[in-house]
């Protein structure tokens, strides 16, 4: 009994399958004329929103990418990162051997100390020499006054007052001599320490010699006054006046040397500035042996290895910031007038099938590529998962406009001929020919500006068998 039931079920299944197959074989194709008319496929016009998109293609690029190279020639000592490693902004990615540059820094530091010492010596010498010049002028003036007084005394004859004056001259000359001797001793110490020039030392020695001679002359003059005035005495007194006048002239001439001392100070200051600049340059070059990345990102290429020589301008490493990627696409000159900064775009990448990335038009380049006649647009896109990589080929659509509450028809319903565009609408089982005007179009739909209303049934398959008013029946 059970076996019979199974046989009956199998027979029923075979009968149903044969019936379905017969119906498929004998189902009329669209465009086949029957008693009901010509079979067609239809679709309804509807109300909706139509968008106008500009299709573009191009490459994914990175806004922030850097190629690092050394500032100085030096051997590479260490590279802590390889391709694919993530680095932070400011991290040292390449180290060069700093030994030679450290020696240059020490040498520059020594040069700066030496220059500062020269400046200090020039300042000290200028201060001491200025005071000494004024002191010497005062002493020379006093010696001249004394010599003139003595000459007057000698000429007037030996008197009690003259004897007293001669004695005063001796005292004054002795004081000048002692002052000159003290000055000479002090200047010798400065000269031995290098704080005094040879010219200044020679001038001090001359002043000492003059003071010594004046002191000796004053003593002799006193002796002559006491002994009585003679022609020889008058002549000697006149010589003292001449010598004192010459000494005053020489002392006043020393003031001219102040300008030379000021030039010495200027030269010393320039030497300090030059030494400071040399030290700064040496330290900068030393710091340059630690090559840092100005951006954070991922190492995309590494061009060198430890032990190799790195010269200025030679690439060492490429780093790319994947958070700054953008889509660089080409727009035809026909579509360019519709594209604006700020418009939304959808981007797809062949390497990541099935994904859509949302972007925004950020910049439109002003000039077209001569060969392709296309203008370049930059579309900023988010890349939170860092899936997009520079160099990927991408396609996109830029949404340039939209029309709300418009009649939308299938694009397959459109018939193109010499009179423009038209459709067949099914009204009371008849095909009615209508001319239409369209607006926005996509790959599948079109905006009907005129000729079609919402809800109209339009023929999408079988139009080639139709004429206006023929009887049809349609399937969806």
Image (cartoon, grey):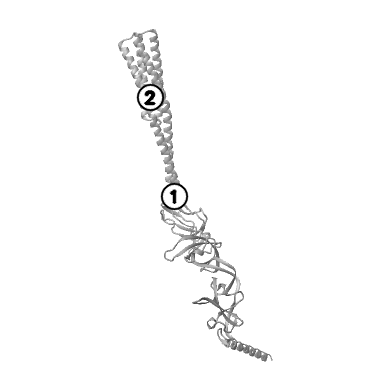
Quadrant in the picture for residue 106: top left
Residue shown at the point (55%, 66%) measured from the top left: 401
* Marked residue nearer the N-terminal end (2 or 1): 1
In this rendering, is residue 52 above or below 238? below
Give residue 432's position: percent from left, percent from top.
57, 80
Residue shown at the point (39%, 7%) measured from the top left: 160
- Relative horizontal placement of residue 138, taking residue 402 as reference (left or right): left
Q: Secondary structure at mark 1?
A: loop
Residue on which the image places disc 2: 252
User: Mark 2 and 1 residues: CB-CB less than 8 Å, in contact?
Assistant: no
Name the outermost residue toward the left.
Answer: 231
Characterize the local packing of mark 1: few (<14), some (14-19) or many (20 or more) Cα atoms within 10 angstroms.
Answer: some
In this rendering, is residue 442 above or below 157? below
In this rendering, is residue 317 above or below 2? above
Residue 210 visible (yes or no): yes
Of the pair 86 and 62, the residue shown nearer to us: 62
Q: Quadrant of the N terminus?
A: bottom right
Residue 114 visible (yes or no): no
Characterize the local packing of mark 2: few (<14), some (14-19) or many (20 or more) Cα atoms within 10 angstroms.
Answer: some
Of the pair 269 and 42, the residue shown nearer to us: 42
Quadrant in the picture for residue 342: bottom right
Give residue 116's position: percent from left, percent from top.
43, 37
Residue on which the image places disc 1: 98
Which of the two discs, 2 and 1, sits closer to the camera?
A: 2
In this rendering, is residue 358 above or below 265? below
Of the pair 152 and 171, the residue shown nearer to us: 152
Q: Secondary structure at mark 2?
A: helix
**Mark pair 2, 1: CA separation:** 57 Å
Name the outermost residue toward the right.
Answer: 1
Give residue 307's position: percent from left, percent from top.
42, 55
Q: How many marks?
A: 2
Give residue 430's position: percent from left, percent from top.
59, 82
């Amino acid at each position: 009994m059970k076996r019979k039931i199974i046989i009956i079920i199998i027979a029923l299944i075979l009968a149903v399958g044969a019936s379905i197959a017969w119906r498929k074989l004998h189902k009329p194709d669209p465009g086949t004329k029957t008693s009901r008319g010509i079979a067609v496929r239809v679709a309804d016009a509807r109300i909706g929103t139509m968008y106008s998109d500009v299709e573009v293609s191009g490459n994914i690029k990175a806004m922030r990418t850097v190629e690092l190279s050394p500032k100085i020639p030096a051997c590479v000592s260490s590279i802590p990162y390889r391709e694919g490693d993530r680095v932070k902004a400011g991290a040292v990615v390449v180290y060069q051997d700093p030994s030679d540059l450290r020696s240059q820094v020490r040498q520059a530091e020594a040069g700066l100390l030496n220059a500062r010492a020269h400046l200090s010596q020039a300042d000290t010498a200028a201060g001491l020499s200025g005071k000494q010049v004024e002191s010497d002028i005062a002493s020379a003036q006093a010696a001249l006054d004394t010599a003139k007084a003595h000459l007057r005394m000698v000429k007037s004859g030996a008197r009690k007052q003259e004897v007293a004056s001669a004695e005063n001259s001796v005292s004054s000359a002795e004081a000048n001599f002692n002052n000159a001797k003290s000055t000479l001793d002090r200047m010798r110490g400065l000269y031995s320490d290098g704080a005094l020039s040879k010219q200044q030392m020679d001038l001090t020695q001359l002043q000492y010699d003059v003071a010594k001679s004046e002191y000796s002359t004053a003593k002799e003059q006193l002796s002559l006054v006491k002994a009585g005035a003679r022609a020889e005495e008058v002549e000697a007194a006149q010589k003292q006046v001449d010598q004192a006048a010459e000494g005053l002239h020489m002392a006043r001439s020393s003031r001219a040397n102040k300008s030379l001392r000021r030039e010495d100070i200027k030269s010393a200051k320039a030497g300090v500035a030059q030494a400071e600049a040399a030290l700064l340059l040496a330290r900068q070059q030393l710091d340059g042996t630690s090559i840092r990345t100005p951006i954070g990102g991922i190492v995309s290429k590494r061009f060198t290895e430890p032990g190799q020589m790195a010269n200025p301008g030679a690439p060492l490493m490429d780093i790319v910031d994947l958070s700054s990627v953008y889509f660089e696409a080409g727009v035809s000159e026909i579509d360019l007038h519709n594209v604006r900064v700020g418009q939304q775009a959808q981007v797809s990448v062949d390497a990541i099938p099935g994904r859509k990335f949302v972007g925004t038009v950020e910049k439109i380049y002003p000039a077209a590529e001569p060969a392709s006649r296309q203008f370049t647009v930059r579309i900023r896109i988010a890349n939170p998962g860092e899936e997009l990589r520079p160099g990927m080929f991408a396609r996109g659509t830029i949404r340039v406009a939209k029309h709300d509450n418009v009649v939308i028809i299938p694009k397959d319903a459109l018939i193109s001929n010499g009179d423009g565009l038209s459709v067949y609408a099914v009204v009371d089982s008849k095909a009615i020919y209508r001319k239409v005007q369209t607006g926005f179009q996509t790959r599948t739909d079109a905006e009907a500006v005129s000729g079609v209303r919402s809800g109209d049934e339009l023929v999408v398959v079988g139009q080639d068998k139709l004429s206006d008013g023929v009887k049809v029946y349609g399937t969806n």
